[in-house]
Image: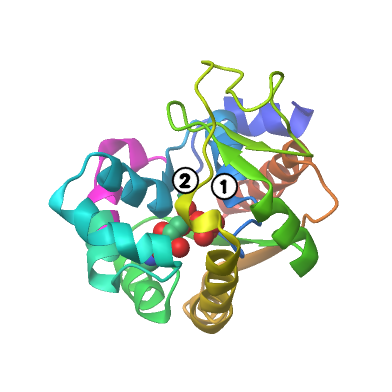
Amino acid sequence: MTTDNADIANKPAPQRPLAVMLFGAPGSGKGTTGKMLAKLTGWPHLATGDLLREQIARKTPLGLEMQSILASGKLAPDDLVSRMVWDRLGWPDCENGFLLDGFPRTIPQAEGLAHWFQGRLFRPVLIHLWVEYNEILRRLTGRRICPACGAIYHLESSPTRAAGVCDNDGTALTIRADDQEEVILQRLRTYQSQTWPVAETLRTHGVLVEAIDCGEMDPESVADRIVWRLDRIAGSIAKN
Ligand code: ADP
């Protein structure tokens, strides 16, 4: 951890808690980075993809409805995902700041979130993780996950010690249903058409947009850089 990371981890919460939105194409590293940031900051990491997959694993009525949508690479309905998020943001662990991963992903979700921020103290910051298209394809096709603990591996860049099983608990790794090649292409199309415009919409609502070029960087360096930027933002808020 750099000195800057230590600063943000040990510092009392800024006057206006940060609401951080991790934004980027599928495979840009939102999930991995989000987990690291949660450790560094103590803020909850709220990933809508994980929340939806949890419902599917538990076979709840919502999960049963969502299963085929996720497997096709299309987006879950806005009202449903938004309700799930508003509910989660009301938990007390979000009061000092939170990390949203995979939300908002459409213009209606972005408008809804901008509305949610109105009259609340949070300082919203969108962190745009930039990764080049071919690198995204490489990452998504080699991704393997542990169904038990959620650890994320990659066949080439972060392999397990023993092939095919999780380093943490020895569970056999799986490929996410939506990491099949045709589905990956569908997810990237969905991203271009529906999610890409979200950053601009939020900017027009006064959200601070910070881009990080992270194609060449390992996940720890990306997380370090984000913490450094957030520390700057939190510091400038504290002076206001
Ligand atoms: P990735 O960013 O790699 O596509 P996620 O885990 O964030 O992976 O999302 C997986 C799937 O969950 C998406 O393809 C979509 O079907 C669904 N999903 C996640 N977040 C949202 C959202 N905000 N709105 C609608 N659907 C979502």
* Residue at 60 percent of width and 71 percent of height: 185
Q: Which region of the structure is painted magenta?
A: 85-96
Q: Please tell me how crowded label 2 is: few (under 14), some (14-19), or many (20+) other residues with Cα within 10 Å.
A: some
Q: Is residue 101 visible?
A: no
Q: Position of residue 226 (x, y in %)?
A: 68, 47
Q: Quadrant of residue 32?
A: top right
Asked if residue 223 lies left or right of residue 34, the reply is right
* Residue at 55 percent of width and 34 percent of height: 41
* Ligand 1 found in image quarter: bottom left
Q: Is residue 45 visible?
A: yes
**Disc 2, SS:** loop
Q: Check the image and name the residue furthest to the top.
A: 169
Q: Is residue 206 above or below residue 47?
A: below
Q: Nearer the viewer, residue 222 or 71?
A: 71
Q: Distance of mark 2 from mark 1, alpha carbons?
A: 6 Å
Q: In which quadrant is the N terminus drawn? A: top right
Label drawn at residue 15: 2
The residue tagged 1 is: 238
Asked if residue 49 lies left or right of residue 171, the reply is left
Q: In which quadrant is the C terminus drawn? A: bottom right
- For the residues bearing labels 2 and 1, Cβ distance under 8 angstroms: yes
Q: Nearer the viewer, residue 79 or 154?
A: 154
Q: Please tell me how crowded label 1 is: few (under 14), some (14-19), or many (20+) other residues with Cα within 10 Å.
A: few
Q: Position of residue 224 (x, y in %)?
A: 73, 39
* Residue at 36 percent of width and 72 percent of height: 109
* Residue at 80 percent of width and 56 percent of height: 215
What amino acid type is highlighted by mark number 1? Ala
The numbered mark, 2 or 1, whose residue comes first in the sequence reads 2
Asked if residue 175 lies left or right of residue 95, the reply is right
What amino acid type is highlighted by mark number 2? Gln
